[in-house]
Image (cartoon, helix red, strand yellow):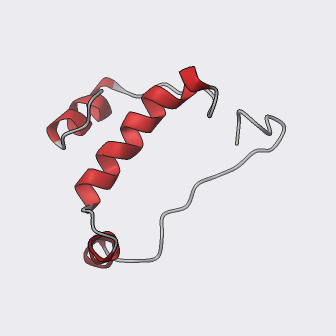
Amino acid sequence: MARHWPAVHACGVAPERSRADEAALYARHGTTLPAQLAGEVERLVAYPARGFIAPVTVPAEVLAAARQLGARV
């Protein structure tokens, strides 16, 4: 949002699902919740350089956790 509509203030909200339900959702789509989370961090790091999103600061702890999940960051 910040890249394309900087004047709009958005707030993310967690889904009203349990972790098990969330994992089942990703499993139905052929992936895992940990893989999805690692991919989200990869995109937060890579997409600003491609002009897709505004740059964000990703804490070192999040990068380390993403690497443990298999992210290439």
The residue positioned 62% from the left and 33% from the top of the image is: 53
Task: Identify the residue at the far top of this view.
Answer: 49
The picture places residue 68, in percent across and down from the top left corner, at: 15, 38
Task: Give the vertical position of 46 relative to 4 (above or below).
Answer: above
Asked whether residue 55 appears in the rendered view, the answer is no
Name the side, left or right, on which 19 lies relative to 41: left
Q: What residue occupies the far left of the structure in this picture? A: 68
Outermost right residue: 7
Residue 45 lies left or right of residue 23; in this view the side is: right
The answer to which of 4 and 56 lies nearer the viewer is 4
Tally of numbered discs: 0
What residue appears at the point 84 percent right and 37 percent down from the top-left corner? 7
Where is residue 1, by image quadrant? top right
Q: Position of residue 51 (x, y in %)?
A: 64, 26
Against 49, is 17 above or below?
below
- Above or below, 58 against 31 in this view is above
Please provide percent x and percent y for residue 15: 48, 70
Quadrant of the image occupied by residue 50: top right
Residue 46 seen in render: yes
The picture places residue 73, in percent across and down from the top left corner, at: 30, 26
Residue 36 to residue 64: above or below:
below
Residue at 80 percent across and 44 percent down: it is: 8
Rendered residue at 31%/79% (across/down): 21
Q: Nearer the viewer, residue 30 or 70?
A: 30
